[in-house]
Amino acid sequence: MALDDASALIDFDSLIDEEERMIQRTVRTFVDKAVRPHIADWFEEGVAPRELASELGAMGLFGMHLEGYGCAGTNAVSYGLACLELEAGDSGLRSFVSVQGSLSMYSIWRWGSEEQKSEWLPRLASGEAIGCFGLTEADFGSNPGGMRTTARRDGSDWVLNGSKMWITNGSLADVATVWARTDDGIRGFLVPRGTAGFSAHDIHHKLSLRASATSELSLQDVRLPASAILPDGRGLSAPLSCLDEARFGIVWGAMGAARDCLNTALAYAGERVQFDRPIAGFQLTQAKLADAAVELSKGLLLALHLGRLKDEGRLRPEQVSVGKLNNVREAIAIARACRTVLGAAGITTEYAALRHANNLESVLTYEGTGEVHQLAIGQALTGISAYR
């Protein structure tokens, strides 16, 4: 008897508790009803579904692993399972949620003042407001410490100048966490939509993450009050701590995309007939499906292990790098292999494999390229930094 879901190969459900399963089922049902019927059109049209924000907020998915201020306060594994189901729908959807919760909200929750938290976190948690995170610049991705965006004091105010690139949710955001170089090192600032001199422009002609808003932020003599600075975030370690939160979601999300590709290929192979038999009965097809299922299983187990470590407060940055490097790399390989099972039909938006593969090319690059994570792991192994 065939399995109805590829993750059942290793009985993954038995490794999570009932509350975690309930959260996973709830998010999967939402994706099935609200996302799957429309995602192919959103992707083809290059539309980011802003209207989903209120529904995602009502489900408690924004900042769900944070405590207080209207956040759900779930454990890390539950957050990971939600990311898995969201990215099974589309990487752009998971990016929307993880940028909102793990970058925008986490930066305020971890480094902000009580006034900033009270003002923004409840609105962001409910989906009433959208946030983004401005760290990357056109010339400084893997080396964010070289940023050119500056903030200088002018009386009691701060004046920001510069630009940020490849910013998810940028044009949708009601508030941007922007990191800038100051005389006191790198600091974070909250920049509300509508602030004079601040603008966001969408990046078009993308071949990946098309159902996601990707923007450039421009700051020209943006004047902010002293209350806009994140008081507890000093130095590059502050924004990098936020990125570790978001990367954890990617570890899980990539496996959601991979699972969706494999389940699609399994269903198609069981129905597609060539040479008078379903292609699922051919040895070469079964080899592709088996290899994909093994890598999916390993990735799920790795994600779960890292989630348990995070819940115990023992997760280290290099361990997140292991998860992000492996799971995204393997998810792309699974998506490509599943596309070949689908044959010519696999290049259309009727099936998700090539859409997932295209999206995962962005996921491989953002929040630390594969090469940077290799070097982070190499430094942990050898004690020697290869990029400084």
Image: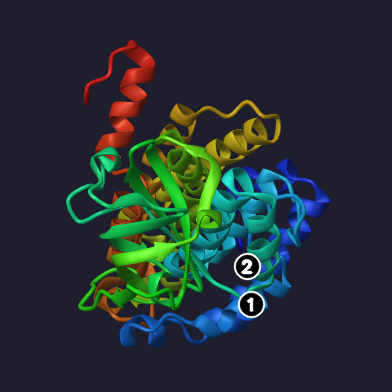
Which amino acid is tagged 2?
Leu
Query: For the point 53% across and 48% down, which residue is it?
Result: 230
Residue position marked by numbered label 1 in the rendering: 128
- In the picture shown, does residue 311 fall above or below 150? above
- In the picture shown, does residue 280 fall above or below 330? below
The x, y position of residue 150, in whole percent, is 29, 50
Query: For the point 55% across and 85% down, which residue is it?
Result: 51
Query: For the point 29% across and 44% down, which residue is it?
Result: 369
The x, y position of residue 113, in whole percent, is 64, 49
**Residue 84's quadrant in the figure?**
bottom right
The x, y position of residue 174, in whole percent, is 51, 73
Q: Nearer the viewer, residue 74 or 326?
A: 74
- The image's colour scheme reads rainbow
- In the picture shown, does residue 6 fall above or below 342? above
Quadrant of image for the C terminus: top left
The x, y position of residue 364, in whole percent, is 32, 50
Q: Residue furthest top?
A: 383
Residue position marked by numbered label 2 in the rendering: 124
Q: Residue furthest front?
A: 155
Q: Is residue 68 left or right of residue 142?
A: right
Residue 341 seen in this snapshot:
no
Quadrant of image for the N terminus: bottom right
**Residue 381's quadrant in the figure?**
top left
Q: Are marks 1 and 2 in contact (CB under 8 Å)?
A: yes
Which amino acid is tagged 1?
Glu
**Category of crowding for the residue at label 1, using alpha-carbon neighbours closer than 10 angstroms: few (below 14), some (14–19), many (at least 20):** some
Mark 2: which secondary structure? helix
Residue 273 seen in this snapshot:
yes
- In the picture shown, does residue 8 fall above or below 5? above
Mark 1: which secondary structure? loop
